[in-house]
Amino acid sequence: MSGRWGADDSVWRQLANEISARIADGTYVLGSALPAEDELASEYAVARPTVRRALAELRRRKLITTRYRRASVVVAMPRPGGLPG
């Protein structure tokens, strides 16, 4: 995964953008739960703290919500024309 990501941006931000793109393309639909942190860490070959920071960014963008000890759920679509929120 790191081969596709640019060296000029942080890994957590690039991961947030990747997950945002998957929301936009329908891989993760509104109301669906994202994979668990450990699954995302394994899929993207990153550490769990990196996943946590990416998910925090998606919460900041208001694309997902996460309840204590629950899955992160898609609640909105990314804005058209750009991934970063």
Image (cartoon, rainbow, N blue to C red):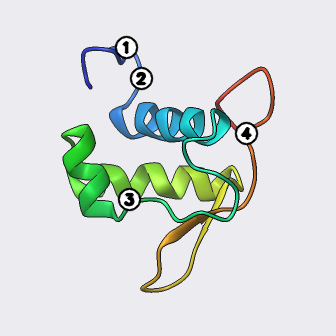
Q: From mark 4 to mark 2, how far is it between C-alphas?
A: 19 Å
Q: Which of marks 3 and 2 is in front?
A: 3
Residue picked out by circle 3: 52
Q: Name which residue lies at 50% across and 41% down.
A: 19
Which numbered disc flags the more N-terminal residue, 3 or 4?
3
Name which residue type carries label 3.
Answer: Arg
Q: From mark 3 to mark 4, how far is it between C-alphas?
A: 19 Å
Q: Residues within 10 Å of mark 4 (few under 14, many from 20)?
A: many
Name which residue type carries label 2.
Answer: Asp
Q: Nearer the viewer, mark 2 or mark 1?
A: 1
Q: Name which residue lies at 59% across and 66% down.
A: 73
Residue at the bottom extreme? 68
Residue 66 horizontal side relative to residue 6, left or right: right
User: Can you give x and y, in whole percent of width and height, for residue 83 in the image?
Assistant: 65, 29
Instruction: Specify the label residue 78 is tagged with.
Output: 4
Which numbered disc flags the more N-terminal residue, 3 or 2?
2
Residue picked out by circle 2: 9
Q: From mark 2 to mark 1, how far is it between C-alphas?
A: 6 Å
